[in-house]
Amino acid sequence: MKKPVRVRYAPSPTGAPHVGNIRTALFNWLFARHYGGSFIVRIEDTDVARKVEGTVETILNSLRWLGLDWDEGPEVEGKYGPYFQSQRLDLYREAAERLVSQGDAYYCYCSPQRLEEMRAEQVRRKQPPGYDRHCRNLSEQERKQKEAEGISPVVRFKAPLEGQVRFTDLIRGEVVFENNTMDDLVLLKSDGYPTYHLASVVDDHLMEISHVLRAEEWLSSTPRHLLLYQALGFEPPQFAHLPMILGSDRSKLSKRHGAVSIVEYYKQGYLPEAMVNFLTLLGWSLDDKTEIMSRQELIDNFSLERVSRTAAIFNRDKLDWMNGVYIRSLTADEFFNVAQPYLMEDKLAGEAVILDEKYVRDILPLIQERARTLTEVAELAQFFFVEELEYDANLLIAKNMSRESANQALKAGQQKLSQSEVFEVESLEAILRPLAVELGLKTGQLFGTLRVAVTGRTAAPPLFQTMAALGKERCLKRIEAAIQRFSR
RNA sequence: GGCGCAUUCGUCUAGGGGUUUAGGACACCUCCCUCUCAAGGAGGAGAUCACCGGUUCGAAUCCGGUAUGCGCUACCA
């Protein structure tokens, strides 16, 4: 009899989730969707001191942005709730008390100062730091005495002194730990909150989690969790420890590596679909060539067997490329919709969207093919929105041209274009190509000069399309302005 | 210090004993297309598969050791 697949993403609300954390959420989600199981979000808010207001909402919004919907959790609920650990304190206390009465755990009255000094001393003597089990065998009398002193104790787990724990990690295979390398970890803190170890074991059991897919940093504490499952008489879930995501210097991702929070990737103009695709490929692969995959393809093909065991460095260049691929795959309407919020951030582009949406919609396809992020859109389109172009007049003089010939080309262009009734790609081409011949210029020279006159740049979308989008009036005005620059 | 995990082009990765002159992608370079840019196409450069030893007729692939990196070693998760 196979139990239903139930996996969870269990973030702690101590700040906006970083990409590694979100990648863990993504793998859990893909796993759940692949097997038709449940994806559960559980908020591990058991550290009162590190808790940051508002981050639960940030976490949920990040999941929503990426399209990672959850079947149980905040705002959805379900029969295994509540999904905030701070609302489940009784459950952890009961478990802790049960362990104490069973003799698998004990009250510890050691002060933080004592523990700190002890650790410092151990490190100094190059001994393995760890709790010295001072309170493990206190007599009833000693306990009463400490209690009378008003010390609120913590509950510690009695780690076995010998033997070993072995388990099969779904990604790494069999792993063995010696029990005597483990110290007596704290289960319940003196403020009544559980530590991660107790809370996750109790909840994973109560919520009937079938597979725990979490970051590699948890591998070392898995034997302790297994011991806890055993002491509590719970059947443990299956474990899979995912490779970590590292910064460019191979160290744990942190602020100095630039954008780490997933929110920043939204702000910087990445599409959720690209982000999902890219993040999945950080630690998972389908085969030796497939890279661009839709959400459904990812779900259909995802499997733990193809998850790699090595930590990966976040490669921004590749993300940019992939985001560009996704941007280009959008329809014009879709692109307008996704780009709009970013355009609104820019003064001139924002005004254009409000005053002349049609104009913006005409322009956008020219930008869509060139943008790699949505934040680049306003910048790439900037010349479409400004009243007066700013550029170095020398740019008007294309390769192997003189100031005079450039000037002449502008005047001739101005003359021809002003006579033209229609102002579309084909008609513009029909006018300007022959003009180059007429002037004895290469098309590149004439077009280059006109491009600078009309856009202020040497690199821009194709000339005729650009001019058609700008319209006759703007083009002639800009050419006139260019001619004025020469006469100055 | 102890314990654990890992180690294929700069980066993400394919590969699971002979099919491999180690494949793909990003980035880089050259050329083509071309009005510039972008996109696209064709090439190029880039990995003694961390190292040493073993198993084997044969090892990137299996085993052992070493090195290096990372993680854990909190009343943080």
Image (tube, helix red, strand yellow):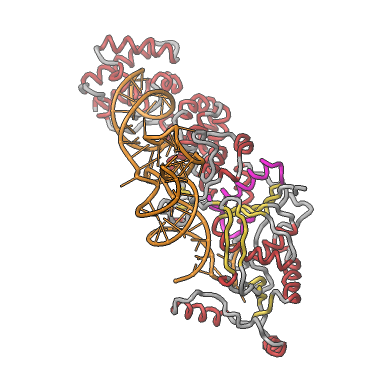
Q: Residue furthest right?
A: A79
On the image, the x and y values in percent for residue A468 come to 44, 19
Res A151 visible: yes
On the image, the x and y values in percent for residue A440 come to 24, 12
On screen, B23 above or below A104? above
The picture quadrant where one finds residue A107 is bottom right
Part of the protein shown in magenta: A10-37
How many circles with numbers are drawn on the protein? 0
Left or right: A166 as drawn, with respect to A395: right
Q: In this orientation, which residue lies closer to the viewer: B14 or A262?
A: B14
On the image, the x and y values in percent for residue A350 come to 51, 36
Left or right: A406 as drawn, with respect to B10: left
Image point 47% across, 52% down: which residue? A246
The picture quadrant where one finds residue A91 is bottom right
Res A376 visible: no
The quarter of the picture where the C terminus of chain A appears is top left
The picture quadrant where one finds residue A64 is top right
Image point 73% across, 70% down: which residue? A93
On screen, B74 above or below A311? below
On the image, the x and y values in percent for residue A163 come to 62, 70
Q: In this orientation, which residue lies closer to the viewer: A118 or A194?
A: A118
